[in-house]
Image (spheres, rainbow, N blue to C red):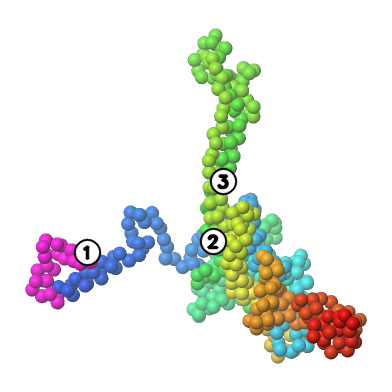
Amino acid sequence: MGGNTNGPDGVPWGVLDAGLAMLAPRRAASRYAARVAIANLRRGYEAGGKTRVTEGWRGSNASADAEIAVAGPVLRDRSRDLVRNNALAAQAVQVLVNNIVGPGIRPRAASGNKAQNKRVDALWRSFAASCDYYGHTDFHGLLNLAVREMIEAGDILALKITTPGGGKTVPLKIQLREIDHLDTGRVQDIAGGGYTDQGIEFDADGRRTAFWMFPQHPGGTTRAIRRRFESERIDATRVAHLFERQRVQSRGVPWGAPAMLALRDLGDWQAAELVRKKTEACLVGIVFGDDETQASVAPVVQDSQGNKVEQFEPGLIAYARGGKDIKFNQPASTAGVYEWNRVQMHIVASGFRVPYALMTGDLSQNNFSSSRVGLNEFRRMVEQLQWQTVIPMFCEPIWRWFIEAAQLAGLLPLDAVIPAEWAPPRFEMVNPLQDVQADLLETRAGFASPQQMIAKRGYDPAAVIEEWAAHAEATDTLGLIFDSDPRKVSKGGNVQPTEQNTATDPATDPATGKPTTE
């Protein structure tokens, strides 16, 4: 062995292994392979090791709901405080709401029956205009507020309120309640294997059956004599609970939770830096001299009137006893403040999941390409939230309530199955000319249909086509030709050679559509 105590992979041989290798090489090789495997397991995940480097790292194997039950109320209160008082947090929330909801996520009936779809869409427009239980806004305003609450507080509750029927209106209203209404202190077992956790009632299979809510907001200004402190049971079929799921969980958390400490520290640092600058600016200089006759040896700083200086004021000149000189204050310069602030704001923007430029308005570090790449990724996230969270958890339940209420009121057939097609708001084009040209090329190549391109912009394809047909009929009747009419004008602006225009205008060249020279 030549005194070498390690194997070819650096694993120690040991005396027993060395002796066994001479007497039973196959057995020694088996032992050595096992030792290598054990050594590799020990090297595994460094983040999973318990060493001096990770000594202060505390983790938890608690469920998401257990962690939310403990930290949720504090996170919610602090998130709301930051949104109220911190400009960056307020802007981050507004950017998310603007992009997720914008002017609204609009439904279209998709039953397959054209006449029925028109009837349902008309009923929806009437319902959406006045569906707010409190009468403040319409459906799109409720959706805007619900998404804002989901981002700021973690989750929001929408209640189905049935109103007296009659006439041609759908007897349904939507009431939004902040998550504070939920009786999170209600935790109990229910006969049959069900249970209630954080105010949400589940059956034996873990499916929601009811919510326990306080009728009035626990933190409201309603007089205690009128406030009801007992929660009431509301069936789950009457509640839409909007929150983002990041684990297998029943409650949400504020979106700014990863950025809260960074945002708070940044605000504290800016306040401390401002106080330091103000303090330095208050003291102009100190004069040492012309009071040698005073016998006191206590160090005293006075102003020009002989009054003891106990606080600094702007433009102050102070006098020190026993001196012969004047010292002017020179405020210290702080290097790298802008860079440090920018790095911290990048961290905050990442925590809120919004682009730095949109949160801060600082476009100095952006060019066209980088802006477009960043916006594309942000838009993917927004589309994911729209289609996987907001629409299935909030929009779809309200659509089902609307259809059921209309059927029970006799406004729609009871046996009708009427799903909805949802149209989220369009994203503004970064470069409108190039984007439209790209859409046109995709459509002409057959990669997408005109209906898809219309829906992409947030419009109803059927409504647009009907409007186009009405416009074409009107222009044909009046004998008008517009550049926007592809039936009569080519992409290059030339008149299309159709039978109609060549018959009515013999001086037109059928090959080019241009007037002849004769």
Name the residue beneath numbered marker 3.
338
Q: Are marks 3 and 2 in contact (CB under 8 Å)?
A: no
Task: Tell me the kind of residue under disc 1.
Answer: Gly
Name the residue beneath numbered marker 2.
72
Expressed as whole percent of the image width and height from the top left, the position of residue 445 reads 65, 82
Which residue is depicted at the point 67% across and 77% down? Answer: 441
Q: Is residue 476 left or right of residue 107?
A: right
The magenta segment is 1-27
Q: Quadrant for residue 220, please give it.
A: bottom right
Which residue is depicted at the point 54% across and 59% down? Answer: 351
Q: How many numbered discs sit on the rendered protein?
A: 3
Task: Tell me the kind of residue under disc 2.
Answer: Gly
Cα–Cα span, label 3 and label 2: 34 Å
| Residue 455 tag number | none
Residue 483 shows in this picture: yes
Task: Tell me the kind of residue under disc 3.
Answer: Tyr
Q: Is residue 411 left or right of residue 418?
A: right
Q: Residue furthest left?
A: 23
Expressed as whole percent of the image width and height from the top left, the position of residue 401 reads 69, 79
Q: Residue furthest top?
A: 293
Mark with earlier residue (3, 1): 1
